[in-house]
Amino acid sequence: MPCLQGYVKTTYSQLVEKLGQPTYKREGTYSNPTENDGDGKTSAEFGEAFEDSFYVYDYKEEQTPMKEHWWHIGGETQQSLTDFEKATGLKAYSHINFYPHCDNV
């Protein structure tokens, strides 16, 4: 079952440039999702073409982050991070021992 494997610090526009338009966009907000939004925890998800390897999403954000943000990378194994880096050229960070408050990562 796919789950969180790591993070990437980037912008929405850079994800669109590297992965194309999101394959999922929430209609409502985190605190007020529509019927079509399920639990509303994700506002945007990228990576349909890579779903056997990785996908990128935000989590519990009221609105889709447009500026630099720590986006989640999901997949079956830590190999998802390597696949993400090869596909995008962006640096991925493992969720193991990850501290987003540190600016040096």
Image (cartoon, grey):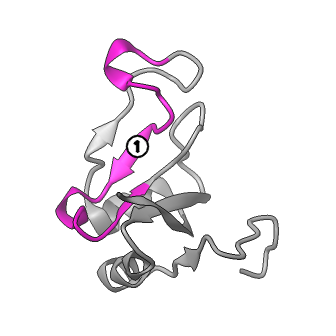
* Mark 1 neighbour density, 10 Å: few (under 14) some (14–19) many (20 or more): many
Residue at 46 percent across and 79 percent down: it is 90
User: In the rendered structure, does residue 45 fall within the stretch colored magenta?
Assistant: yes
Taking the magenta stretch, the answer to whether it contains residue 51 is yes
Q: Is residue 57 visible?
A: yes
Residue 46, image quadrant: bottom left
Q: Which residues are magenta?
A: 33-56
Disc 1 designates what residue? 44
Left/right placement of residue 27 relative to residue 100 reads left
* Residue 93, x across and y down, in percent: 58, 77
Residue drawn where x is 33% and y is 67% of the image = 54
- Tag 1's secondary structure? strand
Q: Amino acid at mark 1?
A: Ala
Task: Specify whether residue 14 is in view.
Answer: no
The N terminus: image quadrant: bottom left
Q: Is residue 69 left or right of residue 77?
A: right
Quadrant in the rendering for residue 65: top right
Q: Please, is residue 29 above or below residue 46 in the view?
A: above
Q: Nearer the viewer, residue 89 or 60?
A: 60
From what the image shows, is residue 50 above or below residue 86?
Answer: above
* Residue 68 percent coordinates (x, y): 60, 59
